[in-house]
Image (cartoon, rainbow, N blue to C red):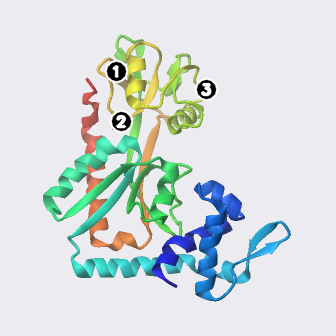
Amino acid sequence: MGVRLIDEALPLLEAVAQYGGVNAAADVLGRNASGISRQIQRLSAELGTPLLERQGRTVELTAAAEALVRAAPQLHAADEAARMAVSDAADPSVGELRIASHVFAISSIVLPALHRWGTVWEHSVWRVREAEPALGQRLLTAREADIVIMPAGPHAPADDHPRFAVRRLVTEPADLIVPRGHPLAVREDEVKLAEASQEPWILGSAGQGSRQEILEQCSKAGFTPPEGHHAQDWTAVSTLVASGLGVSLMPRMAPTHPGVVRVSLSGPTAPVRTILTAVRRGSEQRRLISAALDILTTTAADAVASQQPLLGLG
């Protein structure tokens, strides 16, 4: 099977199997259904056997297609190993790495890591792009990213995912942010999240990741936050809080407005967030990717320990 078909057609066949049909896969992937069918037909021609068959109004996988889907993880791993061998044999210190990261990690983790990278791996470059967690697996599969940084959650691959290797980058606490002069800002004893249950909250809009994170953390603390204003961008959230319009939760590494105070939370419901990296399984053995993962891990730990991003936005 050609490399192009492994890269392009086989993931589409896997998506058809995973989502229950060509149209369903097209909806999830944001692709044209006829284009997916054409790619799978090319793969059928390459293999000399049908992979899709019509059953009434639906299209189903043939027995050969089901066998190919079961073998797909091994095929992808072999492809990845071959690419790694060629790359590292040529010159393991030269190459380009594509890093896709959720916005929160670009300034606090990726850019400091990139500066460290440049002092050691001067003949290798990073290409950084912002990407929502929902796009992470798709970018890896399409080889549009070599490393994806995302929070643990519904869009992150499982630890035992056959296609992707997942690594914990860092676990960071989330702080309650309140305006200066707020009673919780001057407390010297321990503060629990539930003590903010009657405050107006700054939340993201429906469907936004930060909103769901806050709702889940507040639910664990036993309350539903009263909704005040809505913002997704951390700068906007922090500015609204500084203006006295409500409170919110802010990851430790996110920068804050000078007019807010971070309140460290305690107790069993104190919120934390785990940040992950994901790569194509097998590629983590490539020298450049392994080194990049190590530098990202060290940088993330330093960012949380030093609280450097807490210097603020002002």
Check the picture and name the quadrant holding the C terminus.
top left
Q: Residue at x 50, y 53 (%)?
A: 135
* 5 in relation to 210, above or below: below
The residue where tag 1 is placed is 261
Task: Give SS at disc 3.
Answer: loop
Compare residues 247 and 17 and report the one nearer the observer.
17
The residue where tag 2 is placed is 252
Indicate the quadrant where residue 259 lies.
top left
Residue 47: tell me if it is visible: yes
Q: Amino acid at mark 1?
A: Val
The residue where tag 3 is placed is 224
Lateral position of residue 267 relative to residue 218, left or right: left
Task: Give SS at disc 2.
Answer: loop
Q: Tell me residue 22's x, y (percent).
A: 69, 64
Cα separation between marks 2 and 1: 12 Å
Cα separation between marks 3 and 1: 22 Å
Task: Give SS at disc 1.
Answer: strand
Q: Residue at x 69, y 58 (%)?
A: 24
